[in-house]
Image (cartoon, rainbow, N blue to C red):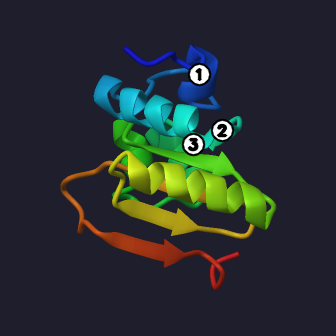
Amino acid sequence: MTKNYFSQSEESCRCCGCGGLVPDFREKLNKAREKAGIPFVLTSAFRCEKYNREVGGSETSSHLAGLAVDIKCTDGWSRFKILSALLEVGFCRIGIGKTFIHVDDDLTKPQGVVWDYYRKQ
């Protein structure tokens, strides 16, 4: 089993502390963190419906199911390390923002996709 790099408080909703990541998703994320060799600072993980609305999240956000995180990323070197590790362990839904990388493992959504948030920021 891979080391767990994420605390319950990092995984749970920022507004109320409820929820957390789905165990298989957490394990895959831990494997990516280990391969990257750099910290993954989670800026968003599980979200309750109220908090998801407050931050402008989609009604179908994978954060609501504990299947998504946003990882802080502000430079090209870190972005490369994080993206390489996510792809290597098999993540295939990745969104790239100016200051974060979104990754989810939601099988109810299209697979093999990468998108950006630049028009939304």
The reply to whether residue 100 is in sight is: no
Which residue corresponds to mark 1? 5
Question: Which tag is nearer the camera, tag 3 or tag 2?
Answer: 2
Dot 3 falls on a residue whose secondary structure is helix
* Amino acid type at image mark 2: Phe
Q: Is residue 88 left or right of residue 11?
A: left
* Amino acid type at image mark 1: Tyr
Question: Observer-nearest residue: 79 or 107?
Answer: 79
User: Which residue is rendered at x = 33% and y = 50% of the image?
Assistant: 90
Q: Is residue 96 left or right of residue 63?
A: right
* Amino acid type at image mark 3: Tyr
The reply to whether residue 11 is in sight is: yes
**Label 3 vs 2, first from the N-terminus:** 2
User: Which residue is rendered at x = 65% and y = 36% of the image?
Assistant: 37
Do residues under tags 2 and 1 come within 8 Å of each other at their CB atoms? Answer: yes
The answer for how far apart the CA atoms under marks 3 and 2 are is 22 Å
* Image location (x, y in percent) of residue 67: 37, 41
User: Which residue is rendered at x = 73% and y = 55% of the image?
Assistant: 78
- 95 w.r.t. 120: above or below: above
- 96 w.r.t. 83: above or below: below
* Image location (x, y in percent) of residue 46: 48, 35
Q: Is residue 50 left or right of residue 78?
A: left
Which residue corresponds to mark 2? 40
**Label 2 vs 1, first from the N-terminus:** 1
